Amino acid sequence: MRLLLVEDDVSLATVVERGLQEDGYAVDVAGTMLDALHDLDSNEYDVAVLDLGLPDGDGVQICRWIRERGQHLPVLMLTARDGLSDKVDGLDAGADDYLTKPFDYPELTARLRALLRRPSDVHQPTLEVESIRLDPATRVVRSAGVTVPLTAREFSLLEYLMRHGGLVVSRETLLEHVWDANYDGLSNVVDVHIANLRRKLSAEDVIETIRGVGYRMGAEVVA
């Protein structure tokens, strides 16, 4: 599971990040609201842990940003503030749960597991293209009925292509939505990941190369 931790206390963020990684999470850490919004716009996450107080904003603003874009990402608010109004503001902004500092690490992980066990949203149906099935809620991919283990990046790439089934998606678009601004648009990172997906899915033809443009997954859309 991929998790975004938004926390400006470097020592706390380091401890929590290490613990989550040991528990099997892939963790990205952001120390400001700007960095958090950039990460959310660039990557696909399974859950987000948001600190309420940040140098350039707060977790409530980030949560509103997430919900205004129709994203159903589970959000846990993590903060030193324990006033009722702070909790109400966070929950009203769309947070799913609230944990006050100081906290016991086992409680944090228990709350995360509870959020991830919640039923998938009706707006996140299983995606299907030919023999490929992808479940955004469980992060499970099957090809011809066989479960296919993918990295977080491969999963995000495949999900983006499947959500745009029948459409030609350029390499530049894939870089913007699946990677981030640190990648050089002229690199072959997209092509390498496409090759890995084809190999793992055992379906060479399911992702079509549109020469000089990009890739298409599924039948061409006819207007």
Image (cartoon, rainbow, N blue to C red):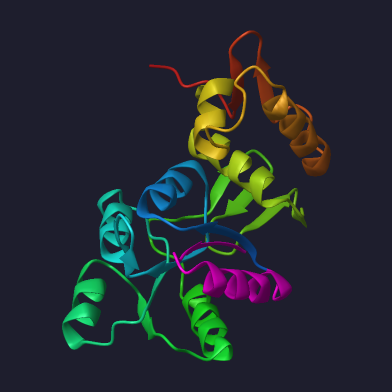
- Quarter of the rendering occupied by the N terminus: bottom right
Picture coordinates of residue 195, whole percent (x, y): 78, 30
**Quarter occupied by residue 211:** top right
Q: Point out the stretch of residues depicted in magenta.
A: 1-24
The answer to whether residue 45 shows anywhere in this view is yes
Q: Quadrant of residue 55?
A: bottom left
Q: What x and y, as percent, mark residue 173?
A: 50, 26
Nearest the eye: 80 or 222 = 80
> Relative to residue 187, is residue 159 depicted above or below?
below
Where's residue 43, x and y in %? 52, 46
Query: In the rendered image of this protein, does residue 27 appear above or below residue 211?
Result: below
Does residue 21 belong to the magenta stretch? yes
> In terms of depth relative to the viewer, which is nearer, 192 or 200?
192
Q: Name the residue located 68 percent from the left edge and 44 percent from the top edge.
A: 154
Say if residue 170 shows up in the picture: no
Position above or below: 137 against 216 = below
Q: Measuring 54% from the left and 48% from the top, which residue is drawn there?
A: 127
Q: Position of residue 5 (x, y in %)?
A: 50, 64
